[in-house]
Image (spheres, rainbow, N blue to C red):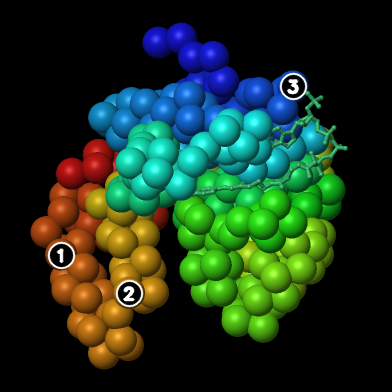
Amino acid sequence: MSYQYINVSNHDGVGEIKLHRPDAMNALCAALMEEVGTALQGFAADDTINAVMITGSEKAFAAGADIKDMAQLSCVDAVQDDFPFSASGWTVLKEYRKPVIAAVSGYCLGGGCELAMSCDFIIATDTARFGQPEVKLAIMPGAGGTQRMARAVGKARAMELCLTGRFMDAEEALEAGLIAYITTVDRLHGDTLATASTIAAHSSISTQLIKESINQAFEMPLSSGLLFERRMFQTCFASEDRTEGMNAFIDKRPPAFRNR
Ligand code: DAK
């Protein structure tokens, strides 16, 4: 499969999608997001892939949806196409079962920040800049910026960020709870790959159920979430990997998981 706007690679259990539109700060045109959707579906169907990472360039993870494309769009066009959910990257990611990490360096703005927040967690460099600057274009976040940002950093900071359009640096993003940890530009790829490889080495039965359970925390009241978690926990006992994991511990040897 050849792509125009992304590079796709495999690293022993980890699939990588690198956004590559250097002349436009990785602006998320529809074709790019379509390619992201295709690559994600490929990794979903590949039994050897247990975790995915999405990266950008040193300068930009992505500076948002493509403003030059949006400038041409009428309200009717946007509604008819359900913009930009017509591009499969957004829909596929929303329902994705394998863990996905966003590795962010440089600008992570607007739709770029929404894409990163649609991943399961974000690892960022000390040069990363996060923001929802749509208000400066007289529009507003449209792919989860008001919803996921408010859940990640709380109402006050989400309001302030989305209403002013200011950028937040990595230290602030870490303190606010938007990102998992900070690394350097030189180490971003290696550190993210190491984290993704750790996840990929676990049984996909448990990693997928953990992901599903944590996501349910944002959809359900606590009592329902706790019940959901308990049922998922009990489900783990049906897997061959659970037997293997516990036997390996008792035998003092590394487990050999088969995702069964
Ligand atoms: N779109 C198109 N081109 C972009 C771009 C963007 N978002 N961001 C940068 N570029 C292009 C620039 O136009 C420039 O191209 P040339 O002029 O060289 O041809 C090139 O990338 C380099 O950019 P700059 O010259 O501006 O570089 P600087 O270092 O001076 O500034 C910057 C970098 C990232 C601070 C600046 O480029 C910037 O402010 N960019 C725009 C950031 C922004 O406003 N982003 C939000 C866009 S609105 C929805 C889902 C999603 C969305 C909407 C709806 N639905 C589900 C309904 C998303 C909306 C958005 O993201």
Q: Is mark 3 within 8 Å of ligand 1?
A: yes
Q: What element carries label 2?
A: loop
Picture coordinates of residue 95, whole percent (x, y): 31, 50
Q: Where is residue 211 in the image (x, y as percent from the top left)?
A: 36, 59
Which comes before the other along the chain, label 1 or label 2? Answer: 2
Residue located 74% across and 37% down the image: 60
- State which quarter of the image contains the C terminus: top left
- SS type, badge 3: helix
Residue drawn at 70 percent across, 52 percent down: 137
Position of residue 16 relative to residue 63, above or below, is above
Circle 3: residue type: Asp
Q: What kind of element bears circle 1? A: helix
Which residue is denoted by mark 1 in the rendering? 235
Classify the position of the N terminus by image quarter: top left
What residue do we see at 20% from left, 56% from top? 243
Quarter assignment of residue 236: bottom left
Tag 1: residue type?
Thr
Residue indicated by mark 2: 219
Instruction: Estimate the x, y position of residue 85 in percent, counting from the top left.
Output: 38, 43
Q: In this orientation, which residue lies closer to the viewer: 71 or 207?
A: 71
